[in-house]
Image (spheres, grey):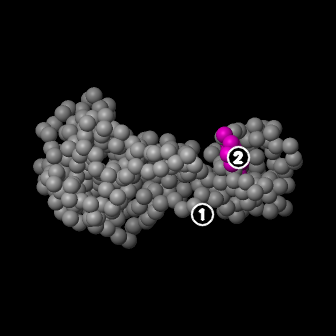
Amino acid sequence: MLLEDLHVEKKLNIVFMGTPLFAVPVLEGLIEKYGVRAVVTQPDKLVGREQKLSIPPVKEVAKKHNILVLQPLKLKEEYEEILALEPELIITCAYGQMVPDVILNYPKYGCINVHASLLPKLRGGAPIHKAIIYGHHKTGITIMHMSSKMDAGDIITQSEVEITNTETASSLHDKLKIVGRDLLLETIPSIIDKTAPRIKQVESEVTFALAIRREEEKIDFNKTKREIYNQIRGLNSWPGAYFMFDNMIFKVWESEISNNYFPDLFNGQVSAVYEDGIGVKVYNGEIILKVIQPEGKRKMTAKEFINGYKEKLVGRIFL
C-alpha cells in the first residue's frame, strides 16, 4: 500500500508513541490518514566516541510536520502533559518504555500497540533479531490492545511474513515496518466502531525476545553451523556478531553453511581459506565467514582480509 493511495479520514485526537526507524512508516501513515496531535518519544541522547546528539527518527518526522513532541525521561512519572491532550486513541510502536495504567486507561478508543511478531511468540524488545536467531520460518505483525504486562494484551489482527533462508534482521525490519503501517491503518476503523476483536493470548505458547545482550553477540564456535549462520543473519545490520582473534574484535556480517567436515580440528580453528571465504570448524562441520570487519576498520570481503593478512591463517583459532 502506498501512502498516496490512502484516503484522509475523520480527524481523531491521536497521540503516537514510538522511537526508532521501525516506527516511522507507522507514524507517517497515521499523519497522512488521520492526523496526529502529539508524538511521545525517548529523550535525545549522546552517542559514540564524539558524544554526538542523536535525535529519535520519529521526532524528526514530527518536527517536519510541526507536531508537538514530548520526551519524558520516566513516563510513569511524567504523564500529565499527555493526558492534558485528551487523546481519543493512543498508538504505540517500539516506544521503549512501559506505559503506565493511568495512560492505558484514558483514551476513548484505547491504547493500541504495533508489535513485530506473531504474538504470543516473541514478546519483548528484539522480536525481529530473535525470530532469525531462533530459526523461525515465519513471523509477522500483531496489532493488539495494550495491557500493563509486556506485550500480553488481547490480539486484534495479525499479518504473517515469511523469513527466507537469506533474511537478515535489516531486511526483515524493512519488510515488517511497512506491513505494520498497512495492517494498523486497515485495523483502526474496527477499533473506532468498536468491532475490533479481543483474542486472548494463549499463555502456554508464550516465548520471549528480550533485548540483545552483549554476550549474545559473541559467536560460539561450539554451536552448530545452522545456529551460527542464524546468529550472524539475526544480528545484521545491528549490533553484529563477533569473534576474537589476535586480541581484536572481528565482526561477521555474512556467512555460508558448508558441507565439509573436519573431525580432527578444534571448534573455532580455521579449517581452510577459500576464494570467497574463511572456513572455521564448528560443532557439526564448517561455517564459512564471507564478510568481516576488523575492529576500527571498514567491512571487507574475506578475500580482502586474507590478502591483507601476512601470516598463515589455516590452523589458527578464532575465539
Badge 1 vs badge 2, beta-carbon distance below 8 Å? no
**Residue 83 percent across, percent down from the top left:** 18, 56
Say left or right for 137 vs 260.
Answer: left
Q: Which residue is mark 1?
A: 215
Three-letter code, disc 2: Pro
Res. 44 in view:
yes
Q: Main secondary structure of the magenta part?
A: strand
In the figure, 22 relative to 8: above or below? below
Three-letter code, disc 1: Glu
Magenta highlight range: 287-298
Element under disc 1: helix
Q: Is residue 297 magenta?
A: yes
In the figure, 20 relative to 83: above or below? above
**Residue 237 percent across, percent down from the top left:** 55, 45
**Residue 144 percent across, percent down from the top left:** 28, 56
The residue located at (59%, 55%) in the rendering is 231
How many residues crowd mark 2 within 10 Å: few (<14), some (14–19), many (20+)? some
Closest to the observer, 216 or 133: 216
The residue located at (23%, 46%) in the rendering is 38
Q: Which residue is mark 2?
A: 294
**Residue 105 percent across, percent down from the top left:** 18, 63
Say left or right for 280 vs 177.
Answer: right
Element under disc 2: strand
Say left or right for 291 vs 134.
Answer: right
Closest to the observer, 283 or 38: 38
